[in-house]
Image (cartoon, coloured by chain):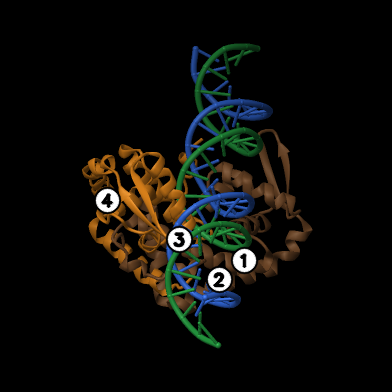
Chain colours: A orange, B brown, C blue, D green
Amino acid sequence: MSLLCIVKKISESHYSKCMYFVSNALARKMEKMALESWKKVNLSPSHAYLLLLVIENPGIQPMELCEELQLQPSTITRLMEKLELKKLIARTFEGRLTNVYPTPKAKELLPKLKQCVADFSESCISILGKEESLKLIQNMNRVSDKLTY
Amino acid sequence: MSLLCIVKKISESHYSKCMYFVSNALARKMEKMALESWKKVNLSPSHAYLLLLVIENPGIQPMELCEELQLQPSTITRLMEKLELKKLIARTFEGRLTNVYPTPKAKELLPKLKQCVADFSESCISILGKEESLKLIQNMNRVSDKLTY
DNA sequence: TCAATATATTTGTATATACAAGTATTATGT
DNA sequence: ACATAATACTTGTATATACAAATATATTGA
């Protein structure tokens, strides 16, 4: 029994008026779509995005990765661990600072990574329409910015 | 080091144009706000919502809970386990079907649970404004419905 | 100059959720 | 009426993320 067991539309749920519920349900669906898109490079979306940041900013530090990815430091550490195991990034340490670099293997992967980003965006647009996609993204950005939490 | 370490606005992130990224970042913030609201009853938002469904539909079956909460069966099982440990629900089994009932303790909790729902909704509205909240919820519902995933 | 504080990162552990395989029951087609 | 398939649920295990405490280094103010 897989996702197919969830047949009902979110908007028909008892809780379709609750921001917590609706935003989390949407995020789970997006996570799943994104996972699909990044299977081609055998990475999860968050690993892929972190890697992209590192390739495009060699020597970037974990704190910057936190800001860009909106994730906690411990989460960044965990993501990096995995990418290091896969020989896609390497870390150097100077004092309390860490610099993160892409390996040659990672740099070779860049075109494929970019393709995944494009593919995912395509999927969104083809399912939701360009208008709707842009509107929602804008809307979510505006709301997120208002939340200090 | 806590959330305070994420200072940047989401809309300023490199990935603020990506639906996956933006929806997940928003959901994490909402999750955190909601956790706060439901601390008063010492339940996580998903446990609280499941419990509410059970109180309002005594005898409800796990599959219906899946649909309403848009969660996989295994997740529903896990949520129920915890609520059962806390003596808030009880299950009866007839054949392959399971019926879930609220305990008296759960029923007593109902007013408080409703208060939490109201408080969370209040928080959203006070931070985001009524207009903005409604618009976003509507928007997210519409998009979710288009995603079969 | 050194104790107190602040900063950057990691580690141990926890929560939320899911997939896949397993179990048990019911329905179906021949 | 019985083998096969479908359904409902659970269990084992995995992923994504976080909090809190620990570690290590850097800054600052007396």
Q: On residue B38, which mark appears? A: 1
For the residues labelled 1 and 4, the Cα–Cα distance comes to 41 Å
Q: Name the N-terminal-most of marks 1 and 3.
A: 3
Amino acid carrying label 3: it is: Ala
Q: Name the N-terminal-most of marks 1 and 2.
A: 1
Amino acid carrying label 1: it is: Trp
Estimate the x, y position of residue D1 in percent, counting from the top left: 65, 12
Is D25 or B126 nearer to us in this picture? Answer: D25
Q: Nearer the viewer, mark 1 or mark 4?
A: 4
Which chain letter matches label 3? B
Amino acid carrying label 2: it is: Phe
Check if mark 1 and mark 4 are on a common chain. no
Badge 2 is on which residue? B120
Q: Residue at x 50, y 41 (%)?
A: A5
Check if mark 1 and mark 2 are on a common chain. yes
Position above or below: D1 against A39: above
Callout 4: helix, strand or loop?
A: helix
Position above or below: B118 against B90: below
Callout 3: helix, strand or loop?
A: helix
Estimate the x, y position of residue A57 in percent, counting from the top left: 27, 56
Estimate the x, y position of residue A66 in percent, counting from the top left: 40, 61
